[in-house]
Image (tube, rainbow, N blue to C red):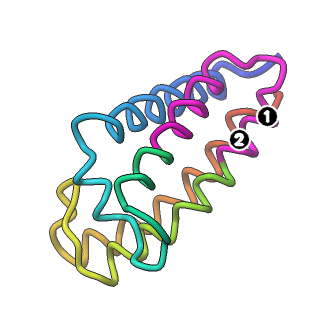
Amino acid sequence: MTSPARMLARIALGGFLTFAGVSHLTVARKEFQAQVPDWVPGDPDATVVASGLVEVGLGTALLFAWRRRRLVGVLTALFFVAIFPGNVSQWTHHRDGFGLDTDMKRFARLFFQPVLVWLALWSTRRG
């Protein structure tokens, strides 16, 4: 059994990821391309589409994968770690996106990624 707080956090995170993933594929593709580091091989749009599909999958799994929710939490945390270089790249290359139009805003955003990693792990634990 999981606590109501963990369940609500997992549902919120799952909904957020699913929404963000759909946004990758539709209305916010250009915004997400600003986060693709220059060193990532291939077309930035292909990277955005691929990460969007992963986000939809992880978000949906957070919402519905009851038996494997711990595994989904670990995979989601690893995904947040994997995309962190994109956030750093957006900051170091001074790229605007999602209202992050100053270096201070882009820098402050970096501190939210560890919170997302923690939330993915905490919300999928039993207890």
Residue that extends furthest to the bottom in the rendered view of this protein: 92
Dot 1 lies on which element?
loop
Dot 2 lies on which element?
helix
The quadrant in which the C terminus is found is: top right
The numbered disc on residue 54 is none
* CB-based contact (under 8 Å), mark 2 and mark 1: yes
Q: Nearer the viewer, residue 2 or 10?
A: 10
**Image position of 25 with respect to 31: above or below:** above
> In the image, is 124 to the left or to the right of 100?
right
Decide whether the magenta segment is chiefly helix, strand or loop: helix
> In the image, is 9 to the left or to the right of 52?
right
- Magenta span: 52-76
Q: Is residue 61 magenta?
A: yes
Callout 1, which amino acid? Arg
Q: Position of residue 18 (x, y in %)?
A: 46, 29
The numbered disc on residue 125 is 1
Taking the spot 72% from the left edge, 45% from the top edge, the residue there is: 75
Taking the spot 65% from the left edge, 42% from the top edge, the residue there is: 120
Task: Find the distance from the CA under tag 2 to the CA under tag 1.
Answer: 5 Å
Q: Nearer the viewer, residue 46 or 85?
A: 46
Callout 2, which amino acid? Trp
The numbered disc on residue 122 is 2
Taking the spot 60% from the left edge, 28% from the top edge, the residue there is: 10
> In the image, is 56 to the left or to the right of 91?
right
Q: Position of residue 6 (x, y in %)?
A: 66, 28
Q: Quadrant of residue 108?
A: bottom left
